Amino acid sequence: MTHIYQLTGMTCSGCEAKVKSKLLSMPDVTSVDVSKDTNTATISMDKHIRLDAFQEVIGGAASKYQISATQHNEAAEQAKSWVETYKPILLIFGYITASTLLIQSANGSFNVMQWMQHFMAGFFLIFSFFKLLNLTGFAESYAMYDVVAKQFKTWGFIYVFIELGLGLAYLTNFEPFVINIITLVVMTVSIIGVSQSVLNKKKIQCACLGAVFNLPMSTITIIEDALMIAMSAVMLISM
């Protein structure tokens, strides 16, 4: 995609060269054309990049160079980019939600506890499947942020099979009290590392879908873990 931005503050050819070099250094930027005469920057990129990321690389908010979007809706582009980035997770959650709701519809009544049980079964089975496609790749990515995997590299390998076991257990309603306790503990430990990475704004790959998709670590990962924690807690309380 290509966008034309307003870029003020350039007063000479040296400014043009400096700004162009900085913008070209950004990941996913493929070409840049800047002009001090028209105060514009034409930037081509593999995927949409936030305006504040451009501003940061050319010197930050206090810089004499100021970039702004005047020819496109930045909010709409960011929303579109977010959906494209997280499409795999959104589709998975959509499929799980739809299929589990259909099960309840077929039953003739809505059983919240059973719906959560089936939802969690689908969640753990699907997410463990993607991790198993590249088990080593997942373990390496997971060790970059998980508090346990950082200390014990084998935890990444074990974690996948715990997820698989939880999925099968929820599917067959095997020892629900024990399984919900395990889920609560495992996902609580997991969310600690995820939260630390997001709060520290670490730009690392999220390993929730293994190494198959290059998904950035973000609050959506926290929501995934928090959802499993909440559901397992509710099911425990209801027993």
Image (spheres, rainbow, N blue to C red):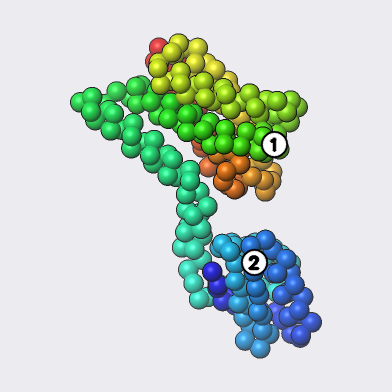
User: If the image is split into quadrants, where does the C terminus sit?
Assistant: top left
Q: Residue furthest right?
A: 14
Residue 19 versus residue 46 in the image, above or below = below
Q: Position of residue 223 (x, y in %)?
A: 51, 37
Pointers 1 and 2 in contact (CB under 8 A)? no
Q: Position of residue 220 (x, y in %)?
A: 53, 42
User: If the image is split into quadrants, where does the N terminus sit?
Assistant: bottom right
Q: Residue furthest left?
A: 108
Residue pictured at 74% horizontal, 69% vertical: 22
The quarter holding residue 150 reads: top right
Q: Residues within 10 Å of mark 1 (few under 14, many from 20)?
A: some
Residue pictured at 58% horizontal, 64% vertical: 46
Query: Secondary structure beneath disc 2?
Result: strand
Q: Amino acid at mark 2?
A: Val
Q: Position of residue 2 (x, y in %)?
A: 55, 72
Residue pictured at 47% horizontal, 49% vertical: 87
Residue 84 versus residue 42 in the image, above or below = above
The quarter holding residue 58 reads: bottom right
Tell me the residue that label 1 is attached to.
140
Any part of residue 194 in sight: no
Q: Amino acid at mark 1?
A: Glu
Residue pictured at 73% horizontal, 74% vertical: 19
Question: Which of 228 and 44 lies nearest the eye of the viewer?
Answer: 44
Any part of residue 42 in sight: yes
Label number found at residue 39: none
Residue 121 versus residue 141 in the image, above or below = above
Tell me the residue that label 2 is attached to.
29
Q: Position of residue 40 (x, y in %)?
A: 62, 80
Q: Is residue 22 left or right of residue 67?
A: right
Mark 1 / mark 2, whichever is N-terminal: 2
Q: Residues within 10 Å of mark 2 (few under 14, many from 20)?
A: some
Query: Secondary structure beneath disc 1?
Result: helix
